[in-house]
Amino acid sequence: MSKSHNFRDIAVISVASHQTKILSQVNEVQLMADLISRSRNSAGLKQEEIGFTCSGSSDFLAGQAFSFVHTLDAVGAVPPISESHVEMDGAFALYEAWVKLQIGEVDTALVYSYGKPSAGSVIDVLATQLDPYYVSPLWPDCFSLAGLQARSLLDKGSISLERMSEVAMRSQKNAFDNPNGVRSSEDISLDDLMSEPAIADPLRKSDLSEIADGGCAVILAADNKADSLCDRPAWIKGIDHRIDSHTLGARDLTRSPSACLAAEKAGRNSDRLDIAEIHGITSAQELILEKEFALEDETKINPSGGALASDTVMASGLIRIAEVASRIISGQVDRGLAHATSGPCLQQNLVCIMEGK
């Protein structure tokens, strides 16, 4: 929902993230210990000064129940902390933390999420979120379903193969200067991408997100607390989360009404957006989102490379928020939109609009 005079002013004041193809030297706890420590140190906070902690991860992906409990060691939960968890991308954990801060009982919050998909078969894990009676027994993976979505877009004339490759090329070139960019190239050409064979027809390898291990930590603060801890906070002007039908056959896969509605409720209007970090696992999904968010030519889309360059399952959405926030905090941009998705074919969507004062 967009902020009104009845809401507290809440901002992102510190971020830290890391992504790599395979996290082999450290485990998830060690990774998050470093990222959480970096984010707290940047904000000048000790753990006991943080009022609320919320995390996002997946037990299915980790291969054990209550796996998030292990990463509480990375937080340093002594003395006892106020803590919560979502079995979703960390962006949705940030939404919960935002609500907690709005209640007014605390002034600061730590949000973090992580994923290590290299340890197993992520496409098999994601198949378990589908309809358990009619779809999941067929074991369609997320990219195969996204291929059906892309084919629907092509048949409708909404996109072209060339336009999809242009999005893929944009991602790789933008990711070249991003230390977290797993798939990047400075001199990739459109012909190179167009000549790739289809993997999930009509999607080529470059049209699919590059699965990566990693994590992200974000510090939120409210009102004067944010101003006292950060020279230029990234103020959350609006945030909203909407859901489309879980039944794929009941949806028009060439659109994402929940993404459009979430953007509207978060305060997306005609005001200029300097950047937009959108979370699509295919080039075709990015094109759907560009249209649903009414992004204009002057808005730089996915300057980090987006999920096509590095897709850390359970953290990619939070990383989109961190990417926008970090550019606002550093003064590179004034206003931006961050987006996170979950579920098959853009089923669930969260939009967060931030700006510097």
Image: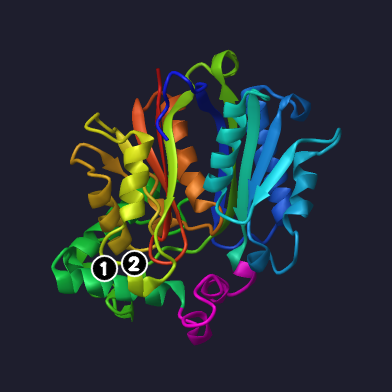
159 vs 262: above or below: below
Q: Quadrant of the C terminus?
A: top left
Q: Is residue 186 among what the camera can see?
A: no
- Residue 300 lies left or right of residue 351; in this view the side is left
| Residue 254, quarter of picture | bottom left
Q: SS class of the residue under badge 1? A: helix
| Residue 112, quarter of picture | top right
Spatial distance from mark 2 to mark 1, Cα to Cα?
A: 7 Å
Q: Residue at x 42, y 27 (%)?
A: 3
Considering depth in this image, is 29 or 179 the residue closer to the camera?
29
Dot 2 amino acid type: Ser
Q: Residue at x 28, y 63 (%)?
A: 284
Residue 193 tag number: 1
Q: Position of residue 215 (x, y in %)?
A: 60, 50
Dot 1 amino acid type: Leu
Outermost residue on the bottom side: it is 138
- Residue 356 lies left or right of residue 75; in this view the side is left
Magenta stretch: residue 91 in it?
no
Q: Position of residue 312 (x, y in %)?
A: 53, 57
Mark 1 burial class by Cα count in 10 Å: few <14, some 14-19, many 20+: some
- Residue 222 lies left or right of residue 151; in this view the side is right
Color theme of the render = rainbow
Please tell me which of labels 2 and 1 falls first in the chain: 1
Magenta stretch: residue 121 in it?
yes
204 vs 212: above or below: below
| Residue 164, quarter of picture | bottom left
Q: Is residue 129 among what the camera can see?
A: yes
Residue 206 tag number: 2
Q: Which region is colored magenta? A: 118-140
Outermost residue on the left side: it is 157
